[in-house]
Image: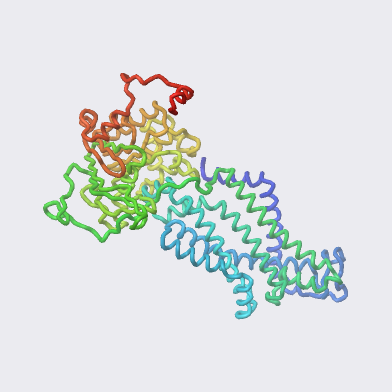
Amino acid sequence: MTTGAHRRRTVRAIVRNPMALSGVLLLVLVLVAFFAAVVIGWVAPEAAFDADLRNVNAPAGSPGHLLGTDSSGRDVLVRLVVATKATMISAAIALGVALAIGIPGGLIAGYYGKGVDRAANWVSNMVMSLPSMVVLMAIISGYGTSMVVTMTALGCMMAPAVFRLIRAQVKAIRNELYIDAAKVSGLRDHRIIARHVLQAVRGPLVLMVTMMSGIAITVQTGLDFIGLGDENTITWGGMLSEGFSALHVNNALLLWPGLAMSLAVAAFFLLGNGVRDALQRSDQPASSRRSGRRRAGAVEPDGHESLGAAGTRDGVAAPAEDEIVAVRDLTVRYGADGDDAKDVVSGVTLTLRRGRTLGLVGESGSGKTQSAFALLDLLPGPARLVSGEAWIDGVDVRRLPARERGRRIRDAVAYVPQEPMSNLDPAFTIGSQLIEPMRHRGMTRKDARAKAARLLGRMGIADPQRVMRSYPHQVSGGMAQRVLIAGAISCEPRILVADEPTTALDVTVQREILDILRGLRDEAGMTILLVTHDLGVVADLCDDVAVMRQGRVLEHATVHDFFARPRHEYSRTLLASVPDEEYVRPPYRDDAAAMTEGVWR
């Protein structure tokens, strides 16, 4: 489905939503009054001040005065229309200032976290602790009744609400796996924020914008009503104040501006709720459901390091020529140094040789994925790399500046995460997500689309064009995994990190995925790091194997040696846990029999 079709579907959802449609109709009425006020200001600027002293306090429906006149004989309808312009402009100023401060602040604080988040959150809390009306009155007493100054101050007071909403939404999705995929593909942070993060927060933001519009109108009207507005500007609040003064003479003067304000506020609230519901029903992105992983700088580099003539750096030997990846003494720590710190990966050393597949195996929580993330520079926010080296193509990327490190990793390494459906952005078609990394590398859209179709065909997908037009929820888990592999190899990496690529797939699809990975290794000469807990997959696909437990590598051997002559006791335990056809399990005994012996089964 194209973006245009998606927009049309959203528009249809809005039209079919009674709440949204009511809001649209009311807002159209307000906008008609606004533009009528603009026309009156050009054609007859004095019309709102013309007094008919023979028709003072004329009732509604009087000849020439549809809504009557006020205590000075001025036409109520004309003044009501003219007041719409000033009131809407005031609300727009306050809303614009709030959004201009709150949206960038929330995006930056939520996306980057750490010190930026703490500082921005402190400022937000400080502003929210101030009494808004008292601050506005103090500003008016010091700077006069300027509408621009007052509404700018109001916008600053409302900005923390926008900031907190955006920050919370961004923090909920910044670790989503499709965000990690965008980082690995080489997108800069501002592109990720604009293309992915903003898509996910716009539903709640639409509702917040409409609510704040109503609040701004109400506050501006209230200030004018109590006499703190510009006396030379016609506003709904000023008309309410005049009507209140003439309450016992002509109580209708309170009705019309009050009704206008109520309709405008209702228009924004109804429209906001309706548009939010329409966006959700039309499969637009909502706030994320789960937290995943986020890139974090592990060890702050101190600059480029060059190899000496003997192939050493600081006295440490560089990897051998056929070692495309060498991880040495890798330690990943969660928490600050002290009693709360925990090393989830400790002293890990791994070697990947060109054109071979290394299986990284171990039970859940053994540190397999954390080791892979350390290599990819995708450690979660609380984690940090406290020691170790990560050599890729003869360069220790941990010693490079962040920008150069990211460039080298994304040029050489591709990542296929587990849970394929969670790693495809639900807001975009599969084709657009496959094309984007190739476009980032300078390929034309036409060539990128053709290559994406070829890659999907290579992955065993019978109808690549249909899949490219589909959204992630429209394909199966096995097909989504093929899409992820196609996207991973689209920029022709030399190394592929596959994290549990066959998890939750049926046996037939698992076999097909393994055949695809085997073909990449044998035909393209790709080096593969396969993170798995399935020893059957290791035996089928891998050339070498490393066994991890409690954050440490216990054994590193060829697959043949591992299965034939495991050296470590834990390796032998893992192999013994694999079901054997020759082993006959004892018969099942029910709970009653077990309880008789005092044993719960």
Position of 164 with respect to 221 (left or right) is: left
Which residue is at the far left? 310
Q: Quadrant of residue 366?
A: top left
**Visible in this render: residue 526?**
no
Tell me what residue is drawn at x 66 percent, y 50 percent.
20
Residue 189 in the image: state x and y as whole percent: 41, 55
Question: The C terminus lies in which quarter of the figure?
Answer: top left
Tell me what residue is drawn at x 65 percent, y 53 percent.
271
Who is closer to the viewer here, 46 or 202? 202
Question: In the displayed structure, would residue 355 be above or below residue 152?
Answer: above
Tell me what residue is drawn at x 32 percent, y 38 percent.
531
Who is closer to the viewer here, 38 or 134? 134
**Visible in this render: residue 53?**
yes
Question: In the displayed structure, would residue 357 be above or below residue 66?
Answer: above
Residue 354 in the image: state x and y as whole percent: 22, 39
Question: In the displayed structure, would residue 139 be above or below residue 288?
Answer: below
Which residue is at the far front? 597
Residue 162 in the image: state x and y as whole percent: 55, 60
Residue 449 in the image: state x and y as whole percent: 41, 41
